[in-house]
Amino acid sequence: MKYLSLFLAIVLFSSCEDVVDLPLTEGPKKLVIDANILWQKGTDGKEQSIRLTETTGFYDNAIPIATGATVKITGNNQETIFTEDGNTGIYKTTHFNPKLNEEYTLNIVYNSETYSATEHLKSVTSITHVEQSSENFFGNESTRVDFYYTDPENETNYYLEEFSSSVNYLNSYRVTRDEFINGNENSGFEIDEDLKTGETITFRLHGISKEYHDYLALLLAQTENGGPFGTPPAAVLGNCSNLTNPDENPLGYFKLSEVSTETYTIQ
Amino acid sequence: MKPLVLAILALLFSLHSLSAQENFTLSGRVSEETTQETLIGVNIIVPELLKGTTTNGYGFYSLTLPKGVYELEISYLGFETIRQKIDLNKNIKRDFRLTEESEQIEEVIVKSNSTILSLKKPEMSVHKVNVNTIKEMPVVLGEVDLIKSIQLLPGVTSAGEGASGFNVRGGAEDQNLILLDEATLYSSSHFFGFFSIFNADAIKNIKLYKGGIPAQYGGRASSVLDIHQKDGNKTEHQLTGGIGLISSRLMAEGPIQKTKSSYLLAGRSSYAHLFLKANPDTKDNDLRFYDLNTKLNFDIDDRNKLYFSGYFGRDSFNIGGLFINAYGNATFNARWNHLFSDQLFSNLSVIYTNYHYFLNLDFIGMDWESGIRNLHFKYDFKHYYAENLKLNYGVNLIHYHFNPGEISPSKEKSAVNKDKLEQKYAFEPAFYLEAEQSINDKIAINYGIRSSFFFRMGGQELYNYENNQPVVFNPQTGNYEEGKTTGTTYYSSNKVIKKFGGLEPRVAISFKPNNNHAFKANYNRIYQYIHLISNTVSAAPLDVWAPSGTFIKPQIADQIAFGYYRNLKEEMYSIETEAFYKTVQNRIDYRAGADLIAEEQIETIILPGKSRAYGLELSLKKNRGNFKGWISYTLSKTEQQVKGTTPGATGINNGEWYNAPYDKTHDLSITTSYKHSEKWRYGANFIYQTGRPTTYPTGQFTTNLGGNYNVENENITVPIYGNRNAYNLPAYHHLDIAATYTPAPKTAKKWKGEWVFSIYNVYNRKNAASINFRQNEETGTNEAVRTSIFGMVPSITYNFKF
């Protein structure tokens, strides 16, 4: 067995990873717009928040916040002002008026420059049921949890699947589309050997636009380990633009999603 | 192009006067004495005239000289030279048998005239690699690797360890034409690039053209790797094999009818799967690769020969039934050699190639298949018109069927719908004519032209785009995006969707002031009509090939090269220096983060651009003695450019030239072998390359997709990447050593065995295959992570023959 594991270690993905000290040069500072409007199914969706930060050097531990901006969203015949919660860079409202498939425009003034973005609030189908099973990977028993939902047949749908569990510090995210599963029952699933009886896993399904799907696929690819078959790294540019100075576009995304959530306790 | 054609005709007519003399033709085949295996590239020289020829890919030669008595010299590296007097007073057919050089003779310096021909030939930018040399090179895990060995030549690099394919003079992996017995192969590696697909035992001859590519070849912009399989021993049955750490191989060959026909059957298989099966925990897993090489050949009579050869190779992975992956090449070909006369040799080939990729993802319930198939007819002629003029001409027709992907549910309870991406079809016909002419004792030229065409055929639906733009630039966000589709058009299968074609001139000239040195120059233009769509750092097995068409234009490569060659100390040493400049039009790159898997509309993710490469190659070779080897060094630059074509569009890196992913400024290889005694031989390789270009982050930003901005562990850190390929990975280098032990045979038995011990990467350098940037899962801080593949790897292999 020792021989075998050595063998596999060499042959299969015989890579070895180590952290290296690599000095990097920092690029120009930019505004980052983290405007995620989520309408949880079954709620009125009036409470929303947006965060503004700035870019920083790759190894810096603290993310600089962007405070003192004016933030508003117009759409569904209403203008909603977001007010900053102290000096946190987080801007909140309790008056947002969500409507499915409606177009909304975000407007931000920060450091006397005006930023803008437009997006639709995308609907999502409900999670119907959850199933638990097990998979065997090289002799290790892993728990698999499937969260089922039925893709609407006469629409082109894009999804963000979000998993948070009691056993992992970071959430995991996956974007998918209905290209191959249109109209069928599909599942978002997680396979994890740490998911033992009593642990919980929460699944959130966001309805998203094609543009956001592409943006997020690229963003997630940058955060994952590339390896020789990874796509080459690339700049992740969102849907926000700088109206004052078009050459200095901000980063981040203005996204509005209906969200379906389910929490499951491992049996 | 007309003036060139006229010039060719004028030259041909000017030769007509020569044929008025009384000339006779000496022709035949050259083969190895004991096995009667035909030999390729053997020199047949008339030293007194400083004239001669070499055997072609089928061991055939023909030499037409004025009536007279000549001393002939038949010489081939590693074989004893034959000297023979011949009275050429009529057309003579003569076959020669060469015996392998015995060890004693090697010590005595026998001056052969073999390099006279190579200096005089305009052929340059070409390397012949000896299979025996390759077998004794130290390699990872002792797996003899043809592709890794050609990377030791000047001008040839790879993306790194575990990277499939190779790059020639700044060419991409898909710009290499890899021929195995004339059949095109679409991938050259096993296990995602760790091992090459060629079983060295079954290989007779390897030739790599980096430039000055003869008109006979076409379809790939950068290089031709022409590999011939052995025909099989015609006199006796023989088994050859080897047992290594990763795989074992066995080859059987022998006569079907003695001296008339022979067979060859060679197999190679890895055996990791046997260990997996033996363990109850892992018995549901499978991991293997295998190859099968076969060949049959029949001498029908003096004028006709038939060859059948085949190759079948597969990689296969099965991870507990959850993930099944199998892919590889299959080729079959039938060839007929026919001599119309002593001076006119012909070969007709029918070749079928199929590259197939299969993937099953059981946990999603999905099967995926893709591939490329082609059927290829070739009719090639070699006309030995006169001693100073040879003509090569022929026709070629390839039919392609591209399957970019087919998806189906793999089990009953699967969410996947059956779907098939549009199948694509094309024809690629070509004609060529080339003359090899020596003007006088000092100057020789090869000049020719290839005319190629490409017909993208219907039988599929194509998308139409607003303003005919499949990719549009969004000036608001600075992103390239998919163009807006305005519907589809169906083209019936007898309709041509798009037609391309062009003339590809090929010229080479040599000037040999004396027998010790020569100057050469060449130019070639090549059209490449099919493209490998790959947006990964290293080409992956599931990458698909796509034909040129409405939105993808053929790549057009122009290359010019100059060289200086010198022999020193009675040919003990040779020096080769070459400089090249190459441009490729319509080289594609991809918009940022393009995902190519199952992409129906490939045109929406690619950005047309161009590439250029230039460099200087130096090599010093020691050709004889117990201590042999070569040093090669290449200084080069490879760049790409994608300009914005619509107003406001930025292209890639603002339309500036940027480093191609395979740009390597410095590339040094030292390859040596030393024969200590009859029992012990040693080898060592050292490789140093500039790290491949990569992109590093210039900062970071944070996002929280769920909108819970205060929940620290839901914040995602995103590296911000700057200009494409603006940095280089740390330099890549390693030293490898090998020792081969051949025990003295105990009895007079036929059994011959040898042990090859090797150590790869002796000083355990952690060469970076990639550097990635991530958030540490435990601490949440950002870090740079180096992935290295092979540390120090010792290995042992046993080879045998009986």
Image: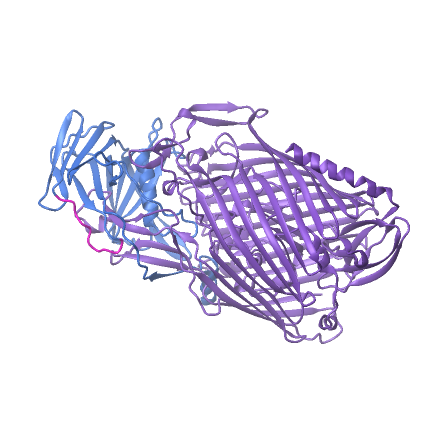
Chain colours: A blue, B purple
Tell me the residue at 72%/54% (across/down): B40
Q: Residue furthest left?
A: A86
Tell me the residue at 77%/47% (across/down): B388
Q: Where is residue B209 in the image (x, y as percent from the top left)?
A: 61, 50
Q: Residue furthest front?
A: B513
Q: Where is residue B541 in the image (x, y as percent from the top left)?
A: 50, 47
Q: Is residue B394 above or below residue B76?
A: above
Work out which quarter of the rendered image holds the N terminus of chain B and state it.
Answer: top right
Q: Where is residue B156 in the image (x, y as percent from the top left)?
A: 54, 54
**Viewer-side residue, B689 vs B715:** B689
Characterize the magenta stretch by its predominant secondary structure.
loop
Q: In this view, does B686 lie above or below A232?
A: below
Residue A196: quadrant of the picture: bottom left
**Viewer-side residue, B752 vs A246:** A246
Tell me the residue at 87%/57% (across/down): B86
- Asked whether the viewer can see residue B339, the reply is yes
Residue B131: quadrant of the picture: bottom right
Tell me the residue at 69%/69% (across/down): B752
Is residue B351 toward the left or the right of residue B584 in the image? right
Work out which quarter of the rendered image holds the C terminus of chain B and state it.
Answer: bottom right
- The total number of labels drawn is 0
Q: Does the magenta stretch include residue B521?
A: no
Magenta stretch, residue numbers = A58-67
**Viewer-side residue, B274 vs B20:** B20
Is residue B237 toward the left or the right of residue B281 in the image? right
Q: Where is residue B609 in the image (x, y as percent from the top left)?
A: 45, 39
- Asked whether the viewer can see residue A267, the reply is no
Q: Does the magenta stretch include residue A63?
A: yes
**Viewer-side residue, B155 vs B795:** B155
